[in-house]
Structure formats: structure tokens, C-alpha cells
Image (cartoon, rainbow, N blue to C red):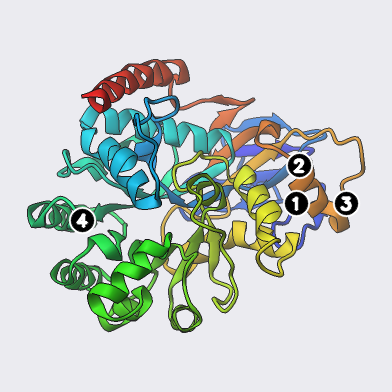
Amino acid sequence: MICLKNGTYIEWQTFEQIPLDIWVEEGEGASFSFKPPDNIPPNLITIDCTGRYIMRSLGNAHQHAYSALCTGMPQPEVPPASFVETLQKIWWRVDSALDADMIRASALVTAVAAAKSGSTFVIDHHASPGFIKGSLDIIARAFDEVGISHLLCYEITDRNGLKGAREGLAETERYLSQRQGLVGLHASFTVGEQTLKEAVALARNFNTGIHVHVAEDGADENHCRQTYGKSVAERFAEAGVFELKGNIFAHGIHLNAIERRLIAKSDTWMAVNFDSNLNNGVGAFSGMGLGPRIMLGTDGMHGDMMASARTAWFSGKGYEAITPARVFQRLQMIHLYLAANKIKGNSDNNLMVLNYDSPTPLIQENFLGHWFYSLHARHIEHVIANGRLIVREGHLTTLDEAEVMAEARIQALRLWGELKN
């Protein structure tokens, strides 16, 4: 058990401030209380939170851990001229080069970054065509070692041939038979009819949803109309995707009005990724007509959800009538997604402690002004995941971070060497 003494708890939905001690129970499904237990355990961890703010931790609704070793990697001699060329010349070469050691290093780096920036849950979308079987287990174990809860999937695709698609389906089935997860698809334009049919059937068998890139670039929609005579969402509707519970559609930039209505009427959630969209030059997301089930992710760009929320506000307000309150709601919607789909690892005992010595008063009425214009991940001092202290005074408690980063540099050089070949 952990006791956070003398801190101020900020309720994540109302921003009400409650200056009380907090007693945090350990374990999935546990909670916290403002009252001490009848029997205080002998191994109690007490942290003085005087002058600190305590909040529910964050979560990442769409991440690509496999990209964690790519910072500074060699770039193609001829820059990509389109989004599809970016995939072909960069990302599909990266994921094809990954092996077990690279996958593990990437997952550890991703989990460490998440923990230190206040995220205790990551929904990841993985691809490693050269090492498929067992890849999800490697990521799950790495996340577990750091202390981060997760919902994983493998990115099934036909782009590496039907054999690769079958292997992706098999890895998904194997993993779902052991752990919670989703059925991953790359995108409509790399998934054929038979693979889509089998993926939907697999999701139905395990009572889970599809996690897929949707209309990230206009090429996805153009391919679908030229090949199948319908939009991406209409294709997915006919395949039975919208009959599933807990789907995650990532991006959704180029959806038309009909597609937005289809999504809004279903149990599908959107995961939007402004930083990645800006980097790839694919356009900007608008939530118009999609309803409230919109979450925020980072799409492999980084693991800082506070930064992701700022970009969603600063960039998003130019494309739809949103407010800081709406963006903050989208940041927190992952908690509602996980609760609605009964996903483990999303209890109230996931907390972060902010050491934020503001030069101006922070009150209930101006919380959002502080959140978007002054609060940063560097203010996160402690992180509690499932009642377990995984970051203390800015340092990881579960693993030797220096060892993780040293190994990551070794694996990054190996990966970059493959990219030069």
C-alpha cells in the first residue's frame, strides 16, 4: 500500500481539488481511499506530497512501439513524395528488419517513456513481418516488466503476401487465447477480402474489436473506391466490422459524411494522432459527425500524452469547433473505452503526482489553462500503476533505465545497419 500524504487530488472530470491524504491499494481492480485502512500494512510506502497535485494517470490509445529505435536513423536518399512512399521507403523497411532483440528493446523504451510521462496504459499496434510468431509476447513481457498495462494487436496485412497474412492471423489467435487484446489490421488498402473476412471472424470468436488505420491518407479511400466501389467504412460495414464491440479506428482524416455517420452509430472508437499527421503531411483530423468516442494517441511519434493533447488543441482548433475542455475529454476517453470493454489495468489506483510550482494560482476554474499552457511531462514526479510505484522522483523503480537505454542503442545500430543494406 502507498500513502500519498498532504497532497491535493484533482478530480479528472470536474477538476475539483481535494486536499487530503490518499491511501492507494495495490493490484488490478483495486482503488484508493481518502480514509486510512483499519489495518495499516507494515510495508506501507509513504510519500510526502506537500505542494504536489495528484491526478489519475494517462493512457495512449494508439502507439507503435516498434518505432522506438528510429530517432536519428538513416533516411532514404530520395525523399518520399507521398504518404504511401513514406510507408514503402521508411516504415515498411523498418518493421521488416525487426527481430526479437529489436522488438524487446523497442517495447522497453516505449514502456519507460510512457511511465515517465504519466501513462500507465498503452494500446499498441505492432508489425514485424520478419518475426511474427511470439512478437506480441515479447512486447507484453517488456511492458509488464516496466509495470505498464497494455492492449496489443498484430498488424495483419496482405502486403507481404498471403503467407504473411496467415502468420499474422495465427499470431493474433495464439495471443488472444492467452491475454486480452485486439485483432489488428494495417489498413484497407493492404488487406484483401479473404484476410478481412478471417480477421472479423477471429475478432468475433474472441469477443473483441478490430484495431486498424482508417482514411489516414486519401490513398486509402481512393484505393477502396477503385478496387471495391465503396468507401473504407462502407467496406468494413459490409464485412461485419461494425457488429463488433470495441473497435479502434486510427486517424480518420479523410472520412466522408456517410462514413462518419456509420462510425457514430456503431461501437467504434476513433484514435487521433495530430503529431504524426503533421509529420506525415496527411491532413488534420476533425471530429465532426463522429460523436463523442474519440481518443488521443501518438502513432509512434513519442510517448508523451500531455504533448499530444497540446498539439490536438493548438492544431485541432483550426479544423473544428473544439475547446480545451473537449480536447482534455478526448485525452481521458481511453479510460471510458477500457471500462466499457472491461479491459484489465484501468482501475482508479493508476495515479501520477505533479510537482508543479506555478507562478499563478491553480484553481478548479482555470485548470485547463494550466494543463495546456504550462504543465509538462517534466512536472511528473511519481507514477503509480495498479497501486504499484513504478516511477519515484522521476526515476523508474522497476528496471535499470540506464541498462535499457544502453541495450536500445545497440539494437538501434543493428536496425540501422539493416536499413542500409
Query: Residue under circle 3?
Result: 363
Measured along the vertical axis of the image, is residue 321 above or below residue 89?
below
- Location of residue 368 by image quarter: bottom right
Estimate the spatial distance between the alpha carbons at disc 4 and disc 3, rounded to whole Å: 47 Å
Count neighbours of disc 4 (C-alpha within 10 A) and say few if under 14, some if 14 to 19, many if 20 or more: many
Q: Residue at x 41, y 56 (%)?
A: 344
Looking at the rendered structure, the secondary structure element under dot 3 is loop
Measured along the vertical axis of the image, is residue 50 above or below residue 9?
above
Measured along the vertical axis of the image, is residue 80 above or below residue 109?
below
Mark drawn on residue 53? 2
- Mark with earlier residue (1, 4): 1
Marks 4 and 3: which is nearer the front?
4
Q: Position of residue 152 (x, y in %)?
A: 33, 51
Residues at circles 2 and 1 in contact by the CB criterion of under 8 Å = yes
- Mark with earlier residue (3, 1): 1
Tell which of 113 and 5 is nearer to you.
Answer: 113
Query: Residue under circle 1?
Result: 10
Hey, what amino acid is under mark 3? Ile
Hey, what amino acid is under mark 1? Ile
Query: Residue under circle 4?
Result: 172
Marks 4 and 2: which is nearer the front?
4
**Position of residue 322 in the picture relative to residue 113 (left or right):** right
Estimate the spatial distance between the alpha carbons at disc 1 and disc 4, rounded to whole Å: 39 Å
Hey, what amino acid is under mark 4? Thr
